[in-house]
Amino acid sequence: MTLVQYLLALLAAIPAAAVAEAPRQGRAEARFEITFPASVHPEPVTGRVYVMISREPEPEPRLQVGRTGTPFFGRDVVGLAPGRAAVIDATDAGSPVESLGGIPAGEYWVQAFVNVYSEYRRADGHVVWMHEDRWEGQRWNRSPGNLYSAVQRVRLDANAGYAVKLVADRVIPPVEIPADDEHVRRFRFQSELLTRFWGRPIWLGATVLLPRDYDRETMQYPVNYVQGHFSLAPPLGFRPGTELHEQWQRDDFPRMIAVTFQHPNPYFDDSYAVNSVNVGPYGDAIMEELIPEVERRFRVIRQPWARVLSGGSTGGWEALALQIFQPDFFGGTWAYCPDPVTFTDVEGIDVYADRNAFWREIDWRRVPIINTREVNGHVRLTSEQRNRFERVSGTKGRSGEQLDIWSAVFGPLGEDGYFKPLFDKRTGEVDSGVARYWKENWDLLYHLQRNWSVVGPGLAGKLHVYTGTADNFFLNNSTRQLEAWLKTTSSPHVPGFFLYGDGKGHCWSGPVSTAERLKEMAQHVMRSMPEGTLTPWWRY
């Protein structure tokens, strides 16, 4: 063994405990040095490293990260070899504290994290590095295969300077898929369409809630396709002790199948169920691969009148979009607090009028744009604060967060293979050309206005929208615009059904329980089915 090899081996053997060192003579410097050993990841890492700084050790600081969570700081790394240090210092952005220099002197619990990216050689010719979902729903701080350090207690004082060494020598284990039971079944498969687009295996899946006595019966059932964020939990919150679980066993309760889709992707835990230039042909994959697989595996009635949609927030937008873009395939939709159905209010930002996504000029005043509010009107987050959180989580739209997935789905392709952003996440400056692209392609209200003679006839009696008037993300504002325009429609006149919860926040779904809502859906199915159709699935 050479002297160099001996020294490297000696450094690798240093325990994972944080070591606070004196800064170099004449300069106070605050920095963290993050390494990982070959024993947990033998190959170089391209990805992003983080350090989390918390006042409390539990839960682990990595699990305290969030929009209003504990301070954390991040930096991209390319080809970082085992044993080599990645440095996070005062030049790196943080959230909610902007830099390490903003952390007050004191004792803290710290933790390092390494988010491992994978190379995607896409069908469009672009090569990008993204976080590969491992069936955790694009949550980098929980994703299997990512690395993290032990939680350490240290004293930090940016004015005096410090250098803290942390070793990410722990690996997040694979996700455990819950076992199937009498009512709940799960499956997943590799999508040919999406794998071809991304150049790596991409998976689709579903969790299926079956009615009472499904295995003993031979009948077919209506199906409720429940849209929403990635989850392996049973659809509709079905679990023992709930009203739905109790009602589900009754003879006089409608027997339906409920299905939640799993379609995480390199940008987010959910694809928005449409084709897009950045995320890929998820709309086609859902319609041509996933739904046919559901219909092959389970006894659903394969008719439009027996297929209904529901979902809230992201799922609310999808429940509307799938119905609007596929008006003759689905028989009705119940959309709760849908994401912006027109882009005049995207969590406070008027995409078409605002020149800056962080600040609004009002006469002589410059006021911050509010991203999130409490139901009493108090500010939870400004737009600038929310976007800083996403920027620290990941550059080039790789945060796994809400505003980045909107840009990925709604926006055009950038020259570097990642999406072209609607606005600069550092300055807030809006790109008007990208704003036009959003409108022309994904503004649901604008789509209806341009295509009403074709789309309108297939939507009669199918639109049901529920939103709180104090939605925390201002989603009630765009639904008001959709409602107002639908009231003016003709040939056909389709006003839709809109209900607003006075003073209710995100995500209000109406004054009735889930079980009662399913009865409404079952009644809707019965009103829509051909005359003479039997209904053995509901003995009412």
Image: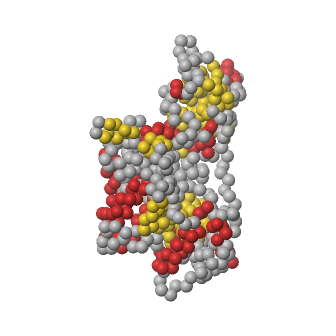
Horizontal placement of 243 versus 497: left or right?
right
- Decide: is 253 above or below 110: below
What residue is shown at x 48% (from left), y 60% (from top)? 501
Colour treatment of the image: secondary structure
4 sits left or right of 27 in the view: right
Looking at the image, which is closer to me, 493 or 131? Answer: 493
From the top left corner, tell me how far across and down residue 113 is, in percent: 60, 36
Residue 70 in view of the camera: yes
Q: Position of residue 126 (x, y in %)?
A: 43, 46
Position of the N terminus by quadrant: top right
Q: Quadrant of the C terminus?
A: bottom right
Outermost residue toward the left in this view: 363
Residue 193 vs residue 533, the one in the foreground:
533
Q: How many marks?
A: 0
Q: Is residue 154 above or below residue 56?
A: above
Q: Residue drawn at (51%, 61%), measured in percent from left and top?
A: 509
Residue farthest along the bottom direction in this orientation: 532
Q: Quadrant of residue 241?
A: bottom right
Decide if residue 42 is in sight here. no
Q: Position of residue 438 (x, y in %)?
A: 36, 52
Against 335, is 373 above or below? above
Q: Quadrant of residue 3?
A: top right
Horizontal placement of 136 versus 405: left or right? right
Residue that appears at 66% across and 75% down: 250
- Identify the residue at image location x=56%, y=34%: 71
Q: Position of residue 61 (x, y in %)?
A: 63, 37
